[in-house]
Amino acid sequence: MLKLVAAGLVVALAAEPAAAESPNLGQPIGEADIKAWDITILPDGTGLPAGNGNSAQGARVYAEKGCAACHGENASGGSNVALVGRPPLDRIEARKTIANFWANATTLFDSIRRSMPWPQPQTLSNDEVYALTAYILALNNIIDENEVMNAQTLPKVKMPNRENFIIRFPNRL
Amino acid sequence: MSRKRGRDQFPGFEFVAGNGLIDRRALLSRGFAAATASAGASLAAAEPLEIDPWSRAPGMTTVPIEPRSRFEAKVARTLTNPNGEPRTQHARTPHHMLHGTITPNPLHFTIVHTGSPDIDPDKHRVVIHGLVRRPLIFTLEALSRYPMRSQMAFVECAGNSAPMFSKEPIQANLQALHGLVSCAEWTGVPLSILLDEAGIDSRAKWLIAEGADSGALNRSVPLRKCMDDAMIALYQNGERLMPGNGYPMRLLLPGYEGNMNVKWLRRLTVTDQAAMTYQESRNYSPLLPGGRAYKFYFINEVKSFITHPSFGSVLKAPGYYEISGIAYSGTGRIAKVMVSADGGNSWGEALLQEPRLPMAFTRFCMPWQWDGQAAILQSRAFDEAGNFQPTRAEFVSKRGETKTVPNVIAFANQHYNSITSWGIERNGEIRHVYA
């Protein structure tokens, strides 16, 4: 059965006409075969995987995975940035934090999944990433302690600073 | 501080601005040699010549990859994280010890967030997918068969010059202040060819570029830029990219902030929206006075700085010097650079060396007769799009300055492009000043 599906995919890809008068040296590849690399999450939630997690589970993952080694106990900061805190944006060098600055909650899931923990990126399960995301959002009082983060709830989280951005060069978009 | 000061003391030069700035046309004329010769007439005669030891015996054996002279060991990048601790590593270009417009590859600045990956070029590939009709994957070998384009282009971190947001001038050299910009000839495949082959969907507006580093650094790039002058660069100054610059392939977006020029490029996802990645959500959205912030800044605006003389060097005696520096703009070719030796009271037009290319370093120079008195050297660049460097007062009125003096390696804010001022003291020492 799998072979049949694969064969069908090759036919479908081959049937798509290539650009005329171009080298066309790229090899067609199906989206299913890109899946292992396809980790980008968009602000509307596109790309969020199945799974879920809450703050209490996230606190356990934070301890188990040694996140405190860089980000400190209770995510209060260490050799790398604090993940909690909302200092005022009262100076141009103010410390930008998740709570006082980030516009999209999806960025949190995306960046944890792609790059954390530092020595072993992309080893967390999707449930663990949702749990860590919930833990950090709850520590910052952006969601309630009991809220579950998943593909439906995370894009709906309203980040406090989301309205405070000005597009610098709109004519370049 | 007057034009007269230089004129009276050094007859024979045509002065164009105060404190001894000489008309750039002097550099082009044969009369210049006579004028400098007469100005230097007071120098003592040289010692009698002897044959030097290196001329008395055969020299070194030629090796396949030539190292620099052992006397040039100090010409090196400065590092912020030499032991590779779990945080970002910065390496800054020593512009005060270089000349011309091309940054040698081992001295090109780099910022690496999770270490440079050790990529086997025969196994690396880049995929284009998302809102395209045919998702495609390219090996390095396949890309190497495409029509190549070469372009001189500067790459600059948006945080370059960040120490100049400080409310007081930080006493640091050019490398510390402006070392996060470099310029190279990049050779690679125009991205538009590959995107056309994949077939862009009509809903597409953005392209999310992602690296193969362990942090999988990613940035959102407007599709417009990708179809305009973006390339997948494979070569840097004629050789394959340096590891810290994205070996074996990187995105090159001429004039756009360095972080968007994604290194170790492995994936290009065509989308209808920006991803708001970690980098663009946090680091590259500069805070404004009052608490709001810019997003999608992208462009490195017109900038210049004097490399010679600059902080750290000492003028040993009054007399002739060439003021020289670098100008560049993310909005086009440099049209003009004005130089002042009196803190901006009067300006003379610098000579621009060729080639003068868009989105690339342009070297400017200005002949100068220093009379041994206090002077403030400044440069101000103008580009062909009509943009020019704001004065510091103009810049700060819009973008603000810090409340406390930051660490010189910290990034108080991003996209600083005002004027750099070097204060020449009567003893020949040079300070960083605001003027």
Image (spheres, coloured by chain):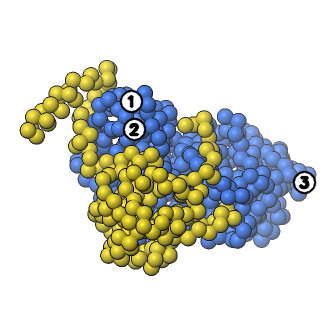
Chain colours: A yellow, B blue
Q: Which residue is mark 1?
A: B200
Does B7 sit left or right of B302 as displayed?
right
Q: Quadrant of residue A168?
A: top right
- Identify the disc placed on residue B2: 3
Q: Amino acid at mark 1?
A: Ile
Q: Earlier in the sequence, mark 3 or mark 1?
A: 3
Q: Position of residue B303 (x, y in %)?
A: 65, 48
Chain letter for mark 1? B
Asked if residue B61 shows in the view, the reply is no
User: At 88% from the left edge and 57% from the top edge, which residue is drawn?
Assistant: B1
Number of marks: 3
Chain letter for mark 2? B
Judged from this view, the residue extending furthest toward the bottom is: A73
- Mark 2 → mark 3, Cα distance in angstroms: 59 Å
Front residue of this view, candidates B363 and B37: B363
Q: Residues within 10 Å of mark 2 (few under 14, many from 20)?
A: many
2 and 1 marks on the same chain: yes
SS at circle 2: strand
Q: Which residue is mark 2?
A: B270
